[in-house]
Amino acid sequence: MGYKLAYLGAICRRDLSRYPRPCACVADEFQTFSVVQDSVTQELIRESAGIVCYATQSLQAIARRLHEHKPGSGVFSLVGNIMNRVVLQSGEEETVRWMADAWGKEYQNVPEMHGQHVSIRNDYRYKVEPATLTSLQTPTRDFPYAVGCVYRGGQLFKENGEPFLYHAFPRL
């Protein structure tokens, strides 16, 4: 953990006019290395042409590391500063609901059956249902890809006009 903070500090201190190329900090099982100061550090890193790439299984894992009973202000401040997110299949309810909330809701026409009659009502529904994120394709022998949902911090993808896009990531 000390190495991570030292490295991030070095990114913030470097002379951007001399070293303009972005630097990255990549951490798998991020909750192991997470500290409360990470949310503030992320803002400084972005201003210094730094990139953080954190991988974790769930928001609950980060909450435990930050001594929160369940994901709260510390966790949401931390992950809220991460603009681009990739979500692969997850069975953790709180994580998938948070991601679905981040991607938003919209009014949809929903058909309803009333005996022999069909009616249409307007309902406010998730653009990506939490259940969809729990059933994303994982790699198999016949299909060596993990399907994920990529979120781009409010920027719209030209492919679908939404801030999220499904993508198949090859298994390495």
Image: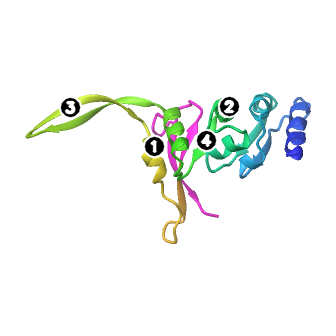
Point out the residue furthest to the bottom here: 141
> Which label's residue is closer to the chain start, 1 or 2?
2
Q: Name the residue under label 2.
A: 81
Residue 120: mark: 3
Q: Mark 4 belongs to which amino acid?
A: Arg
Disc nearest the viewer among 1 and 2: 1
Q: Name the residue under label 4.
A: 85
Badge 1 element:
helix
Q: Dot 4 surroundings within 10 Å: few (below 14), some, or many (20 or more)?
A: some
Could you say which is closer to the camera, residue 84 or residue 65? 65
> What residue lies at 59% left-to-right and 45% top-to-bottom?
86
Q: Residues under labels 1 and 3: Cα distance?
A: 23 Å
Residue 171 lies in the magenta stretch: yes
> Which label's residue is closer to the chain start, 1 or 3?
3
Residues drawn in magenta: 149-172
For residue 77, side relative to residue 131 (left or right): right
> Which label's residue is closer to the chain start, 4 or 1?
4
Q: Mark 1 points at which residue?
A: 130
Q: Residues under labels 4 and 1: Cα distance?
A: 15 Å
> What residue lies at 69% left-to-right and 44% top-to-bottom?
64
For residue 101, side relative to residue 18 (left or right): left
Residue 70 x/y as whole percent: 61, 38
Q: Mark 1 belongs to which amino acid?
A: Pro
Could you say which is closer to the camera, residue 123 or residue 34? 34
Residue 54 x/y as whole percent: 71, 45
> What residue lies at 85% left-to-right and 38% top-to-bottom?
8
